Amino acid sequence: MEKVRDSIVDGLFYPGERETLKKTVARLLGKAVVPFTDAQAIITPHAGYDYAGMHIAHAFKAASDRFIRTIVLLGPVHRDPEKAISLSESAFFSTPLGSTAVDSSLVEALTECSTTMIQNDIPHLEEHCLEIQLPFIQYLFPEASIVPILMGLPSQGNIRALSQALDVVFGETIDTTLFVISSNASPHTKPGAVEHYADSFIASIVSGADNRSVKACGFGCAVAVLSMKSVCMKPFLLSRGVSEVDKGALKRTVAYVSIGMKKETGDE
């Protein structure tokens, strides 16, 4: 039987009932206002919809008018990251909205590009960062297949290997491919520090500023996509915000942003 990666945070990070989830995604997308709808790549947070739903909606709205065959889903491993880049062994990823097919041929092609890239479902089965994006994908691009990728340690070697592999495998199908990078803009931190982390993340992505102070969990994935040689993209900030978690005497905040990357042409 074909393996299915079942949802693990439905009912927690987003509604667990099909119709409620569908209406929630539609409502969020309906409220999102963006300057373009043809993004080649997007950066979107991976928090609960009550906290980051509008930012996720802004990101996906920025790509909503494209014809997409393949969505490359990239995110970090939060728990015990290893050196490898893990590709899913599952044939489908499911949410209450249904099941989305994984393009196994593209997964195989990526694994042939580098020994750093391996098929390993274990990180995927306990990681939420890609699942958070799936209901928006299923709502906007129901016929698209996905290629789920989790980066372990964001070393320079991993970033370079991933970027080169993306060029090799997707260079000729860029026009029907969407890159979705799942990343918050800061770690959970003290309220006074969160804006600094967010500013560093935004500056590094949008203007290529010094990135040594960036602590965003999915930053390595973003750098890999922006480093691709087969497509030139210009990033635009779409939205930003901060949420606070009150744990008694301990307050922690996290920053969220949405960024859309437009494909640049020779005329621009």
Image: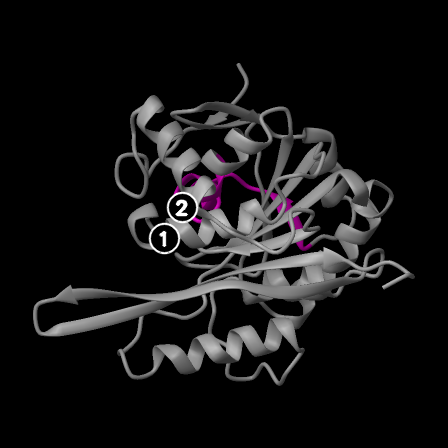
Residue type at numbered disc 1: Ala
Residue type at numbered disc 2: His
Residue 84 position in % (x across, y down): 59, 56
In this rendering, position of residue 190 left or right of residue 233: left
In magenta, the rendered stretch is 116-134
Q: In the current view of this chain or complex, which residue is farthest to the left?
A: 248
Which disc is residue 128 wearing? 2
Q: Quadrant of residue 266?
A: bottom right
Taking 83 as reference, is 105 above or below it?
above
What element does badge 2 sit on? loop
Taking 124 as reference, is 145 above or below it?
above
Taking 212 as reference, is 257 above or below it?
above
Q: Quadrant of residue 212?
A: bottom right
Residue with the mark numbered 1: 47
The C terminus lies in quadrant: bottom right
Residue 37 position in % (x across, y down): 64, 47
Residue at image x 26%, y 41%?
Answer: 12
Residue at image x 77%, y 44%?
Answer: 112
Magenta stretch holds residue 41? no
Residue at image x 73%, y 41%?
Answer: 177
Q: Earlier in the sequence, mark 1 or mark 2?
A: 1
Query: Are there few (<14), some (14-19), or many (20+) residues within 10 Å of tag 1?
Result: many
Magenta stretch holds residue 125? yes
Residue at image x 66%, y 71%?
Answer: 156
Residue 49 position in % (x across, y down): 34, 46
Which disc is residue 23 wearing? none
Estimate the spatial distance between the alpha carbons at disc 1 and disc 2, rounded to whole Å. Answer: 9 Å
What element does badge 1 sit on? loop
In this rendering, position of residue 28 left or right of residue 1: left
